[in-house]
Image (tube, rainbow, N blue to C red):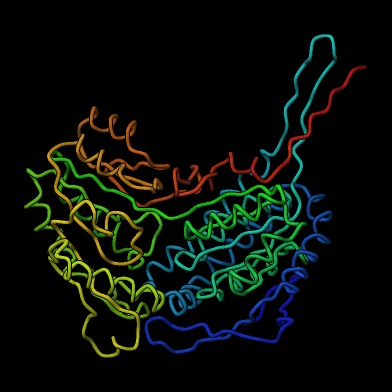
Amino acid sequence: MKMQINGKAAEACGGEYFDVKNPATGEIIDQVPKGTEDDIALAVEAAESAFKGWASTSPQQRGIVFYRAAEIVRRKKEELAALLTKEQGKPLAEARGELEGFAHVLEYYCGLAGSLRGDFVPVPGNGYAFTVKNPLGVCAAITPWNMPALIMGWKIAPALISGNTFVLKPASNTPLINLTLASIFYEAGLPAGVLNVVTGSGETAGESLVRNPDVRKISFTGETGTGKRVAEIAASGMKRVTLELGGSDPMIVCDDANLESAVSGAIRGRFYNCGQTCTAVKRLYVFESVAEEFIKKLESGVKNLKVGNGLDKNTDMGPLNNRHQLNFIKELIAEIEEKEEGKIITGGKVPEFEGSDKGYFFEPTLVSDVPAESRLLKEEVFGPLLPIVTVKNLDEAIEAANRSNYGLGASIWTKDLDRIRTGCEQLNAGIIWVNQHLKVAPEVPFGGVKESGFGRENGPDILSEYMETRTIMLKT
């Protein structure tokens, strides 16, 4: 699989490649170029050359391309899902859902295409004023490996529908689905150069993309430390930046919650995509009065999860995406046991089945009696490990939930309207779910506070982030 530059497959200038592996088997499934600074320059140049033509097309024409692309994605969903599972590891059902989400994002912004407009204002004594919305030019994004298709959609859709051109640097672990989806856009009629994908490392391709003076906006999703680096580099060029960074989302289960729903929400919220989701449930706070019953139900549900290759029909949870993530989870388990910072209720080891030693598998794991100083409650844990803390009341739960450098998402499970209001007012998070967790819709803004980043993805307001407002004063 090659890079996409100017709508065509391209080799890397340096002629070097890196392997893309199946995390369930360790097998090499493809190779992609190690993009260089020169490759980034070529991609940005292609986007710059295509900008004037794409910006001059009507939003409705752009929307037609989106609609066709969404149609092709749905038609090819099964083969695309198999590709996504092979390089990312998630079960086929989750891969299909992610691709449906990608198509839905395109259709949503297709529907907004006709709403791109400015304002008209009478100015007493000075005639009239009106505003014009213009696209920025070349925009860019650096995307992660956990939800490579969906997050690609979040970033390219509002930019392209607004008339910008684009350069995407996907994660090195999961570039194949991004390259394939880019080719589908061209199949749908996208003009050459409007969307370019350059594979490569963050240190080389990523930094070159952020530094390039012709890139006017950067959207980054990933680890907080890297996000700070992106912001630092972008600031020197006065580029617009959106950062969607790490999360350590708390889930609060009150004593009046529907426990069956809360258990199902906790299992999906934590173990979907093997726990490798920014908005996953990463800290669980349960009222003492229902903790024993809740944990018993939760343990039973977690033990029923089938771990295996995502291509197998009966798999509930696939492998971690890479060895680094597996080693991190093993390190945390060893630390829990060594320091006695919690009790492992279930899981805590590599599962035993044929071929499990060849992939990056780990059992879904529950840990109770976790002290406040534990890394499980302080750091972002990307993996199938859920710490459980009992609390006396909502005040204690909210105080513990807010005791984090992160503020991406949070959820509260209760039937009490006063508790819902208190949780929504006091939880420090960019998105708060009530009696649900994890779902992020393209129709609403999404982003975090504190070290979870700044700026928002999705929703109609994001279009203004990809456009300049020009004010024209007219006196006749």
**Relative to residue 464, is residue 211 depicted above or below?**
below
**x and y percentages locating residue 46 in the rendered image:** 79, 66
Observer-nearest of 432 and 62? 432
Residue 41 is left or right of residue 340, and the answer is right
Q: How many marks?
A: 0
Say which quarter of the image contains residue 289.
top left
The residue under the point 69% across, 51% down is 236
Quarter occupied by the N terminus:
bottom right
Residue 372 x %, y %: 21, 51
Q: Is residue 357 left or right of residue 111?
A: left
Residue 153 position within the rendered picture, expressed as x and y whole percent measured from the top left: 56, 58
Q: Seen from this angle, which residue lies furthest right?
A: 476
Q: Nearer the viewer, residue 44 or 135?
A: 44
Which residue is the extreme one toward the top? 125
Instruction: Report the quarter where the C terminus lies.
Output: top right
- The answer to whether one can see residue 63 in this image is no
Image x and y of residue 407, in percent: 39, 45
